[in-house]
Amino acid sequence: MKPLQFHLSTLLPATLLAFSSIQQAQAENPIQFNRDIRPILSDNCYACHGPDASTREAELRLDVGEDAILDRGGYRAIDPGHPEKSELIARIVSEDHDLIMPPSEHGEPLSSEQITLLKQWIREGAVFESHWSFQPLADVTPPEQEKNEHPIDAFIAARLKEKGYQFSSQAEPRVLLKRLSFDLTGLPPNPEDVHTFEESHTAQDYEKWVEKLLASPHYGERMAMYWLDLVRYADSLGYHGDQERSVSPYRDYVIRAFNENKPFDQFTIEQLAGDLLPNPTLEQKVASTYNRLNRASGEGGVQPKEYLAKYAADRVRTLGTVWLGTTVGCAECHDHKFDPYSIKDFYSFAAFFADIKELGIVSGARHIEQLPVPTPEQKDQQDNLKSKVAAAEQEYQKESPELQKAFENWQAQSLEEADLWDNLSPTSATSQGGATLTIDDEGTILASGKSPDKDVYQIVVPLEQSLTPMTALRIEILPDDTLPNKGPGRAGNGNFVVNAINASINGKSVKWSRSFASHSQQSFPAENLAENQKGWAILPQTGQRNHVVLVIENPGQFASEKDSELVIEIIQNHGTSHTLGKFRFSATSSEKLSDKLSFPEASILALLKSEERNSAESQEKLLAYFRQQTPLLKTERDSLNQLRKELTRLEASILTTLATKATDPREMRVLPRGDWMNDSGEIVTPSVPKFLTPVVEKSERLNRLDLANWLVDARNPLVARTFVNRIWMLFFGQGLSPNVDDLGAQGQSPSHPELLDWLAQEFIESGWDVKHLVKLIVTSQTYRQQSQATPELRKQDPFNRLYARQSRWRLDAEMIRDNALAISGLLDLDVGGPSVKPYQPAGYWAQLNFPKRTYQASAGEGQYRRGVYTHWQRTFLHPSLLAFDAPAREECTARRERSNTPIQALVLLNDPTYVEAARVFAQKILQTEITSETERLDWAWNQALARSISDEEQSVVLAQLHEAKTYYEQHPEAAAQVVQVGLAPVPTEISPLDIATWMTATRILLNLQETITRY
Amino acid sequence: MIDYQAQQLAALQQNRRSFIKHTGAGIGGIALHAMLAADQNSAHASQLTKGHLKTLHYPQRVKRMIHLCMAGGPSHLETLDDKPTLRAKHGEPMPESLTKGQQIAQLQGRALNCFAPQFEFKKFGASGQSISELFPQIGSVADDICIIRSMHTDQINHDPAHTLFNTGSGNSGRPSMGAWLLYGLGQETENLPGYVVLTSVGKGGQAQPIAARQWHSGFLPSRYQGVQFHASGAPVLYLNRPEGVPMSQQESLVGSINQLNRQFDSVVDDPEIATRIQQYEMAFRMQSSVPELMDLSGETKQTFEQYGTQGGDGTYASNCLLARRLIEKGVRFVQLYHRAWDHHGGIKRSMEITADEVDRATAALISDLKERGLLDETLVVWSGEFGRTPMAQGSGRDHHIKGFSMFMAGGGVKPGISYGNTDEFGYNAVENPVHVRDFHATMLRLFGIDHHKLTYKFQGLDFKLTGVEEAHVVEEILT
């Protein structure tokens, strides 16, 4: 054994210090390897003598029994039964600086208690156990129960008895119902409900409440709050520009799944592999968005291969923490130091996800794959519209002799007229406003560059002698991809307004006798061009070709024997860039002009003139084109276009989510030391660690569905243990094994291992029934105890690992918000929908870029939705939630911090959300029938805390009210100011003075420790 | 976690008074007791909140740090690392021996040609340090600074590179340097957070996005996280009272809240309440201490000239002045982000603008601290998250991680020296390479901390700032 890299903290965390005292107490019993010995070896020895082959010293493993007791040429590290002959003991007690273990530069010597334990263990035979959480679930029956005793209580009571304690009394009904309500729905109970429960709180009454709250749609929201932390659900990418992405349908799936009590095995399968199920439903596809929740980058210089490796590792870390409850992520760079996960295991897990269609660099439209998720109403509308479109299409395509005749006429006329018009080739095109006008070979003019609000274009065109006297000018208006909304105009919607077209030939002004167009916007007819300055525009036909014809009055005066020069001025005064984007001119000297001119586009004209004209294919093309033009089909065409537009609009409004789409799996290699540039590692295929339950045997490559099925295989002990342990945490504040994110060797053993296994078994046998599990827990006496600890208990069992009482904790960030809004009456209780944006200090997003963003707080009901619906911007999470320890969700979070900071005080005192809630709450007080100050206070206390105000409290608050009243009487302008906070309307029948005064009472209430704590 | 306070109570085996002292610390671990003391003298307050290190491992050379974070990645080739060879080979292909198989950001798949340094270098000070003509003022403090020309890092994109520079890992979820320092050493301020962040944007290039993660406490308790001060609006989020509520009303409101909480404590006996009360008092006091800090009216005309700012405008220069004021109050860690150094194109003009924005104020900060006798116990660090390629990206340079420069000044750092070198192209750090984690180890050493021994247990592992790879203190630059 020689010293190697090894770090033992000189600062033992509080939890370990206190745990050691429990260990001592346990040492009176026979030694158990997992309970007593493994923590010592794992903490002090496994870094060099554990599972990681690359750092293993002296070829000695102390995590594998056979290896530890091996004869090493005359001595053994561990000689079962003989501590005095065991080298391990000799080394941990050695006083020789070169020999002592752990090496002095890497860790403190073991304590005498630890040494005693190790000696005793070796003396008793040095029995190794595999790590507890990897062992199959034990077949446990609850300890002997008293009549009607709850099985959970039987386990807890047995330990309590052993330690000489007993359950605390049941919490008072008010406290119990509040606790239950927050724990199951994240919301406070109605004061009336508390009153009813106080009147009658038998076990049956209590159970009814449990049933009622479990059936509440808000139960799913509460459970989702926690699940979303685990799976790191967020509304933005998380790297660099932290651009938004749409995944809220997944959030709603989670809420629905808990509300409908979807069995947890099904829940698991749908998230990991919903897309791979046979004929997956939309809901199952949405569930598989789980696989796309990882952070992703849209930064310009991203090397896709590097980021694909990051995303892959992220998924394995999350899988490991969410379902296996272990830190598989440690094996990204090397074999796990403490648990038997190898680096190959890590990349073999990653290989399961190698089929997911994605790109290393994400940007805008390239963010694949989007899945539309219509609401049921939208789906109905969509189906309805689709069938209407089909019907309208049929109408539009109908045939009739009349139509056929018109078609033939049109062909003849077009041919005839086509010859009348000559394309003009301008020699110059200039913009007074500074736009760039480019003329191409065919005389087409395209505007680009600067886009002035108003503009005048001047175009100079040589006219050949054959065109004189010119009788009419035609302008074709053309769409182009470079123009907004495809043009043909430069306004944001693709429109333009041409107010007038002035022309002169050889310096002599032209007057128009009339003008007409293939299409005109309502109120902007082409006729205007010849008559007044109102102008011609083309909504809604943006992105389409159109044309206008201007007929010259008295053309004879322009006759010339030479070539002439035509100068055209296009006046565009409408503003906001309503200017032409793309257009070209043609002219005619014919006098046979009718208003029913048709101007087929160039390709159609070419077809008309070609010899193929009468072939079936050509005729079909021509007819299709004709249908688009002919006035005969105007009604049918308009109605079809209208319906298509409605369908497009509806489809654009449908929320999307990032979909998981399986493609050919990418090659997955072991990346030595996690280095994505290193291609020397072996290629791996999907598989699971050998030391765990075997996976299904298949000849073809395993996929995510196999992985999901493996997780929820009843023989796999980790998933149920992990989940049950966390559900326990939601109701007791800590897991039975306190490290809810690590059930591996470095986690703490469960305080009640039998109970954990029994619950896990019960959970599986119930069909992974989450509500059953929750109900089981909250109906126990253990849960219903009061949370007050006697000084004796607090001293002897500071972590409450014996459960001789309940625990108490500050509410989660979202619940603090929900509670304040609920008390004030502002809370919107709708379930599901896109994320919303509560008030946020201006400038908080100033550090975001690509693009820069201005935060727009939601209006209306959106402002008062539950915290679970808050827009989750990873790099700048809403500061009010962040202050109360909501995680950024960049990585999986299994347990939130519960801090107590001045920033929290500032939030509750000054955040407009809470000030507005206080205002609306004050209004509510003033709108009751009650008029006396003291009765009003009592009513308010009942609303907020479900109890009466005490005399001491009353005197403090009354003094505060009077002080405020005096101030606001003298400063009515301040009162008028303070009631302006927030979007909620201020009732006109109440004076600002009263509201401002009573806001002091309600602000006090919303700031109290009692208000933000679950007791 | 449930009964967290109770656990701490038992673990610390201390009386209630010191329990509050240890657990109640708030934003960035603000001192809690002495809450009502009016004395803001930082020297007097030095023992107020202890850190988790009971003893230091080395003599403490500095107590505080200012990190001037040049976000975007300033080019070392135009600032601190003169490369005549690169200048001579302008336009020629870079030697493939250097570039082959190396990571590349935006130049992926493009020709890699040498791009001459766009500015001349000069010798400054008695030490004759070689510094770009862009930095005449920084040049004027050349004898006070230690330049490292052999930095290298692992992350080639901004976001993970910043994360690595701040937390030692490109993954998120780890504590930043400032949080580690507060956790280890505690803090000395009564009225201000122990870790303050200021940001500015420049006119020479796109503003680099910076995630709040960069000053987060990761898995450390959130009271150790940095608190961002803002130039406009409330200087600290939610610091301003609701409109129409005067200071007097707010004060008595906080008094009433605390009184009611105290009364409730006598009913439920909840140790958390005592902490909550202290936090409300702290919050209330911040409503005056922070605006006081931000109010520069007491500064002299000469100071404003020295920094080149009138203050209060959110510029880098103004933030430098605020940094000095924060350091005076005993704030442990001040981080300034100037988000203007990502010069993929037009590097010549952009560098002129951006260098001008930071040159005078950076030098002023160092000399001001020195004149006030604070530089001896302060560490000032000027660095980006990486450097830029010797290769052209049009008229600019791409991200580069194999070699870049930074400089430091302050207690325990040898002044007027340069350390390490890149090759003749400025590509690889070849002489005395210093990885970011070596910088972390060195920085901790200056605070008296052995980087192996500042650890925190999370998910069963002892995490530390320098991570799992070996890190070395750069002994050669220490006095």
Image (spheres, coloured by chain):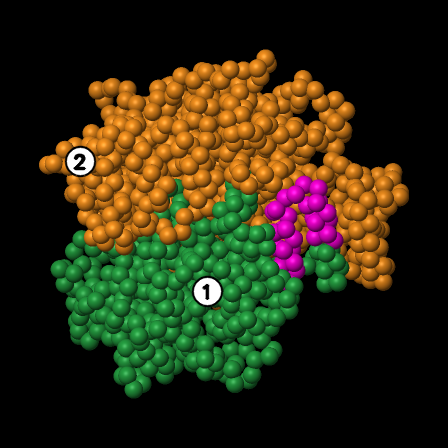
Which residue in the structure is indicated by mark 1?
Answer: B333
Residue type, label 1: Phe
User: Which circle marks residue B469 in the picture?
Assistant: none
Which residue in the structure is indicated by mark 2?
Answer: A76
Q: Is residue A993 above or below residue B415?
A: above
Q: Is residue A80 left or right of residue A372?
A: left
- The reply to whether the magenta stretch includes residue B276 is yes
Q: Colour of chain B?
A: green
Q: Which chain is orange?
A: A
Query: What are the residue bounds of the magenta stretch?
Result: B256-285
Closer to the camera, B38 or A13?
A13
Residue type, label 2: Arg
- Subunit bearing disc 1: B
Quadrant in the picture for the C terminus of chain B: bottom left
Q: Is residue A440 above or below residue A395?
A: below
Closer to the camera, A800 or B240?
A800
Q: Is residue A377 left or right of residue A314?
A: right
- Say if residue A582 shows up in the picture: no
Q: Is residue A473 above or below residue B66?
A: above
The spot of residue A164 in percent (x, y) is 54, 29
Neighbourhood count class around disc 1 (C-alpha, 10 Å): few under 14, some 14–19, many 20 upward: many
